[in-house]
């Protein structure tokens, strides 16, 4: 059960089993928390996982555009600041300055 699924279950239990008023302040706040989507924020690269977890990394490029890419970090590199691309890419190592978790894919495919 995901965190959001748990919160929905708890809200419904409070409302329907324990007959809590759904319009009281704390139940309204609970409802708002459940229905607010969290947007990941870019974090300093120093806080990125170093266990091979895939991340979305960002760095300034020398091209016209800057872009994020899916990367990972493990202890195999000589340079402790280097990350690797997931998949085959021309560059073997990059040095991102920011990261965030890779978003979960949509449940429904178009």
Image: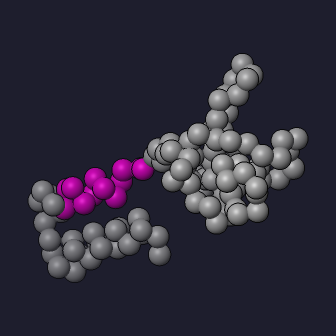
Residue 20: x and y in percent read 14, 71
Q: Vertically, is 74 above or below 60?
A: below
Vertical placement of residue 27 versus 1, above or below: above
- How are the colours assigned in the image? one colour
Q: In this picture, is 73 found above or below 61? A: below
- Tell me where residue 10 appears, x and y as whole percent: 30, 73
- Write down the region rendered in magenta: 27-38
* Left or right: 31, with 24 as reference point: right
Q: Is residue 24 left or right of residue 94?
A: left
Q: Look at the image and tell me whether residue 36 can be seen.
A: yes
Q: Nearer the viewer, residue 74 or 71?
A: 74
Magenta stretch: residue 32 in it? yes
**Residue 40 is one of the magenta-drawn residues:** no
**Residue in the foreground of this view, choosing between 21 and 92:** 92
Q: How far across and how far down the image is residue 110, in percent? A: 69, 48
Please name the residue shown 41% across and 68% down the image. Answer: 3
| Residue situated furthest front in the rendering | 78
Relative depth, front residue between 1 and 39: 39
Tell me which residue sits at (34%, 58%) in the image: 34
Residue 107 visible in the shown view: no
What residue is rendered at 46% in x and 70% in y? 2
Q: Is residue 27 left or right of residue 95?
A: left
Q: Main secondary structure of the magenta part?
A: helix
Indicate the position of residue 42 as horizontal and vertical percent values: 50, 42
Q: How many marks?
A: 0
What residue is at 82 percent from the left and 53 percent from the top?
87
The furthest residue to the top: 64
């Amino acid at each position: 059960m995901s965190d959001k699924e748990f919160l929905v279950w708890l809200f419904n239990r409070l409302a329907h089993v324990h007959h809590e008023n759904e319009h009281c302040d704390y139940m309204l706040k609970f409802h708002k928390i459940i229905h607010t989507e969290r947007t990941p924020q870019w974090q300093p690269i120093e806080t990125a996982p170093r266990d091979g977890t895939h991340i979305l990394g960002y760095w300034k490029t020398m091209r016209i555009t800057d872009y994020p890419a899916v990367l990972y970090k493990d202890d195999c590199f000589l340079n402790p600041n280097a990350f690797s691309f997931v998949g085959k890419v021309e560059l073997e190592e990059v040095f991102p300055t920011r990261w965030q978790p890779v978003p979960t894919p949509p449940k429904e495919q178009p």
